[in-house]
Every structure is written in structure tokens, then in C-alpha cells.
Image (tube, helix red, strand yellow):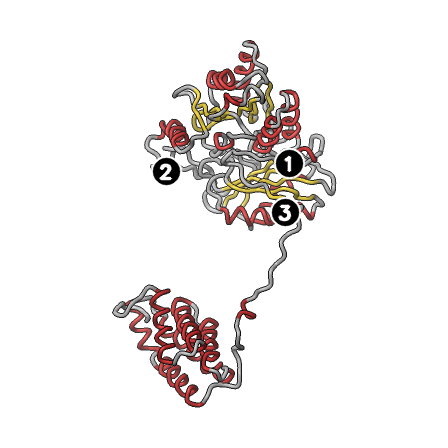
């Protein structure tokens, strides 16, 4: 029987409560509304703004961190209602958040399109309205993995919801009324589309890993709770998977009305969000973003804003989602507006000219050329003698290194010595230039630790000769440089 997945938790039944406690312990910008088992977090200063601003509340099941509490802050959410792992929060918790946070301007609930969330936020809104609180709801269904007419609830709400949070939050922060905040939120929800791709499913705390995507299987269009996707395929290079995700968003859908989920005109501006589903690294996100921008530009779209990061995750899923928001001048202004929400990343303006590639100044940095008429006879004789000795000692050096290391010392030294003999006729006659040329020979031929240590040795020695010091002092300076940078001292069983 497979063992539960290892995670940094205590008890699986305590993870949400302990996460909430830790979040509060590490922040002074948040407060808690009520006590366990209710998990409602809010801006610590909500009482100072709810008399003049519309309050924004979102939430849903836990396991998507930093969503939703990470997006609480000025210019975004006022509060977040957290359910259990992948479970909708209760209607009583949502109602508690509304009653506690909303002031005279009212409250907007931003709800991802899942049955549990719709029902629990919905009944809470009805009760709040009955109590005289002005309250509206914006439902977000940006997932392009499901057909538009699929099922009762339709498309799921995923990472594109964050664009809605930002647009609504910026509208509320400038003092707009509930009607305008709701209109901007719903407009953003209608203009956003997302698609996910994953290499693995997610594993709930205390649960046994799901092997649905073992081996080289990839799933396109799976949900943020690990729900099966639109299709499975064998692993393909990243660029191809990015193209599949963008096709799902922008290409006409077969059947139905044959219209794409998102259909911006040629030349339209879009905002791009590359989201890690938990285990996807910043390196991978950059590779994904690189090709996404290339593809969108090839389609005639202008990627005017972009950002990436782990924003709405699925615990530990190795996957990504791409979200596109069709920009209007108003939405661009709202995205650019400041926010103090800690999890909202920098939104980069890509309409600005890219910084030029700066020419490599490495070769121009050298004050003297690395080639010349050759060494003086006595210097050449010393270099040749040393090189020949190293070549002849290859077998012995290898034997020693097989005991103390990985056995490559002999061949590495031989490569460096042979390259020096090859390059020696073109070395500068000046000693400092010759030493720098020897460093270059080591760099180009040896590699590994031995190569870089000898490059350091000859470079440091060359500097001392250029400063007017004698060759013995220069060679000592080279030895001291190896000690400093390599950390070895005389007596250590290593190269010195």
C-alpha cells in the first residue's frame, strides 16, 4: 500500500487552521473575523475604509495559496473566506464576512464558478440583502477546458479570477459606487480566458499520491482541484504545450457556435498571466512566458502587460495555466493601479521599448592583446618543460585522483599542457601578457575545477607582473589567489 505524500504539516485535519494562524502571526496587515472552524481573514484597517469604499470579498477552498488571502490589501480584496482543503466555505462564514466588513457603500462578492461556492456565497448574499446590506455578486468562469454549454454550472473559475480581483479592487479603491465596481468586475470576467496544462496531479495533505499522470503523460485542461482535463497526451516540448493552451483559448471551438472563448481583434492589447500550479519553477515559467509572447505576437495581438508566478495553485501540482485578459484603456489603468496585496506580482508594461542588448565588453576589457610574437627563449623553455612534465605525469595524476577524486585530473592537466604548447608560439613576449594568455589557454581547454583554478593562478600572477613585481612574487600571488577563492590551504589533499 502506498504511503501518504510527505509534506511539512502536523496533522492533515489541522492544516487550514494552522495555515491561518501562521499567516496572521507573520503579518500585521491582516485580522481574523470570528474563530475556528470559521476561517475569514480581512484587512486590518477595514473599518477605516468601509464607510467610503465598496468592500470586496472572495474566497473558496484552501489549497490554492497564495489565493485568496494573499490578495487581501489596498486596491484588491478586503477579505477572503477560506474553506477546507478544496472545499467551499460555509454560507455562515461568508455571511459573517459580509456583515463584519461591509459598510454603507456595499459589498461585491467575487466567486469562482463552482457549485459549492455559488450556493454558499449565494445564500449568504440573499441573507445579507434581507438584512439591508447592499450586496452584488460576480461569478468568474474563465476555464477554456470545458465547452461553453457543458453541465449546469459551465466553465470553472481558475487563475483568470485574479484579473477580476485587480480590476474590481482598483475601481473600489478610487471610491466608485457598487454599480460601477460590479460592472468593471463583470466586464473583466467576460474578457478573461484561461487554460491549464499539468505533468502531475495534486496530492491533498495526508493523502496517497494519485498516479493518473505517471510516466510521460501530460494532461491539458485539468482543473485546479485535480479534476480530469480535456485530454491526455504524451510529454512534448514546452513550446508545443504552450501552443495547445493558446489554441484552446483563441481558436474557434468545434461545434456549438464555433466561436473562440476569447476573440480579440488583430492588434488588440491583452494582458498575460503565467501561473504556476504549485511545483512549476520560475525557470519553467520564464520558458513558458517566452513562447506565449512569441505566439501571441504571431497572432497579431499586442501583449501589453504580463506577469507570472505561483498565484493560484493546486497544492503541489506540476503544471501551469495561461490567462489572457482582453484589455481596454480602462482595464489597463486598473491593472496598473497600485495595490498592497502581498501576493500580487509586478505587472510589466511590454509596450515600452525593450532594453537593448549590451555588447560584450569582455574582450575590450583586456589592456593588452593575448597574442604576439612568442615568448623569450628562456621563458618558452620553462613553459615547455612544465607542460611536458604534466603530459608525462598523466597516468600518475589519474591514479592519485582515482583514490581521492573522480579520476579526471590526469587527462585534464594533459589537455591544458597540450593547449599551452600549441598556443605558445603566439603568446605575447611581455611576461604579464604571456601569463594572461596562459590563463586563456587553461580556460579554453581544461574546464572543471582544475581549469578555473589554474586560470585564477595565471590571471593573479599576470596582474602582479603588470604592477612591476618580480616573477617569484607574482607566482606566490597566484598561489594565494587559489587559496582565497578555492578555500584550500597547504596540507589539504587537493590541488594547490
**Considering depth in this image, is 429 or 381 the residue closer to the camera?**
429
Q: Tell me: 487 left or right of 464.
A: left
Q: Secondary structure at mark 3?
A: helix
Location of the N terminus (image quadrant): top left
Is the C-beta separation of discs 3 and 1 under 8 Å?
Answer: no
Q: Furthest-left residue in view? A: 491
User: Which badge, 3 or 2, comes first in the chain's sequence?
Assistant: 2
Q: Which residue is mark 1?
A: 325
- Image point (58%, 21%), residue name: 52
Q: Is residue 219 visible?
A: no
Residue 380, compared with residue 168, is above or below; it is below
Q: How crowded is the residue under tag 1: few (<14 C-alpha within 10 Å), some, or many (20+)?
A: many
User: Which badge, 1 or 2, comes first in the chain's sequence?
Assistant: 2
Say which quarter of the image contains residue 131: top right
Q: Which residue is mark 2?
A: 7
Residue 341, compared with residue 487, is above or below; it is above
Q: Furthest-right residue in view? A: 266
**Considering depth in this image, is 494 or 46 the residue closer to the camera?**
46
Q: Secondary structure at mark 2?
A: loop
User: Residue 293: which disc?
Assistant: 3
Is the C-beta separation of discs 1 and 2 under 8 Å?
Answer: no
Amino acid at each position: 500500500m502506498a504511503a501518504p505524500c510527505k509534506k511539512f504539516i502536523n496533522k492533515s485535519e489541522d492544516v487550514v487552521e494552522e495555515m491561518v494562524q501562521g499567516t496572521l502571526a507573520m503579518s500585521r496587515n491582516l485580522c481574523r473575523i470570528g474563530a475556528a472552524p470559521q476561517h475569514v481573514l480581512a484587512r486590518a484597517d477595514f473599518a477605516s475604509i468601509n464607510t467610503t469604499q465598496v468592500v470586496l470579498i472572495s474566497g473558496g477552498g484552501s489549497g490554492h495559496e497564495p489565493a485568496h488571502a494573499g490578495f487581501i490589501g489596498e486596491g484588491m480584496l478586503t477579505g477572503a473566506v477560506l474553506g477546507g482543503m478544496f472545499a467551499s466555505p460555509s454560507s455562515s462564514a461568508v455571511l459573517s464576512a459580509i456583515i463584519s466588513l461591509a459598510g454603507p457603500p456595499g459589498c461585491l462578492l467575487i466567486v469562482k464558478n463552482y457549485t459549492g461556492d455559488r450556493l454558499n456565497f449565494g445564500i449568504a448574499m440573499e441573507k445579507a440583502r434581507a438584512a439591508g446590506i447592499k450586496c452584488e455578486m460576480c461569478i468568474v468562469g474563465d476555464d477554456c477546458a470545458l465547452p461553453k454549454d457543458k453541465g449546469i454550472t459551465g466553465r470553472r473559475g481558475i487563475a483568470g479570477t485574479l484579473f477580476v480581483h485587480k480590476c474590481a479592487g482598483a475601481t473600489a479603491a478610487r471610491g466608485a459606487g457598487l454599480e460601477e465596481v460590479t460592472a468593471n468586475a463583470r466586464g473583466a470576467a467576460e474578457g478573461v480566458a484561461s487554460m491549464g496544462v499539468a505533468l502531475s496531479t495534486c496530492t491533498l495533505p495526508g493523502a496517497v499520491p494519485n498516479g493518473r499522470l505517471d510516466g510521460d503523460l501530460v494532461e491539458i485542461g485539468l482543473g485546479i482541484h485535480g479534476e480530469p482535463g480535456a485530454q491526455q497526451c504524451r510529454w512534448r516540448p514546452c513550446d508545443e504545450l504552450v501552443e495547445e493552451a493558446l489554441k484552446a483559448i483563441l481558436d474557434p471551438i468545434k461545434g456549438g457556435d464555433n466561436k473562440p472563448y476569447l476573440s480579440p481583434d488583430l492588434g488588440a492589447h491583452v494582458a498575460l498571466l503565467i501561473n504556476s500550479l504549485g511545483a512549476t519553477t520560475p525557470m519553467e515559467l520564464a520558458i513558458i512566458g517566452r513562447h506565449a509572447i512569441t505566439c501571441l505576437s504571431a497572432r497579431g495581438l499586442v501583449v501589453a502587460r504580463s506577469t507570472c508566478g505561483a498565484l493560484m495553485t493546486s497544492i503541489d501540482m506540476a503544471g501551469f495555466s495561461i490567462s489572457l485578459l482582453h484589455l481596454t484603456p480602462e482595464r489597463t489603468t486598473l491593472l496598473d493601479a497600485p495595490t498592497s496585496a502581498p501576493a500580487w506580482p509586478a505587472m510589466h508594461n511590454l509596450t515600452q521599448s525593450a532594453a537593448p542588448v549590451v555588447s560584450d565588453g569582455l574582450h575590450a576589457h583586456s589592456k593588452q592583446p593575448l597574442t604576439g610574437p612568442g615568448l623569450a627563449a628562456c621563458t618558452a623553455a620553462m613553459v615547455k618543460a612544465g607542460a611536458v612534465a604534466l603530459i608525462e605525469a598523466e597516468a600518475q595524476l589519474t591514479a592519485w585522483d582515482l583514490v581521492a577524486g573522480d579520476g579526471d585530473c590526469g587527462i585534464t592537466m594533459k589537455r591544458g599542457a597540450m593547449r599551452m604548447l600549441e598556443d605558445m608560439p603566439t603568446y605575447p613576449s611581455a611576461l604579464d601578457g604571456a601569463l594572461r594568455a596562459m590563463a586563456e589557454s587553461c580556460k579554453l581547454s581544461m574546464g572543471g575545477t582544475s581549469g578555473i583554478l589554474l586560470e585564477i593562478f595565471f590571471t593573479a600572477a599576470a596582474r602582479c607582473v603588470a604592477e612591476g613585481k618580480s616573477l617569484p612574487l607574482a607566482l606566490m600571488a597566484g598561489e594565494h589567489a587559489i587559496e582565497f577563492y578555492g578555500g584550500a590551504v597547504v596540507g589539504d589533499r587537493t590541488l594547490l
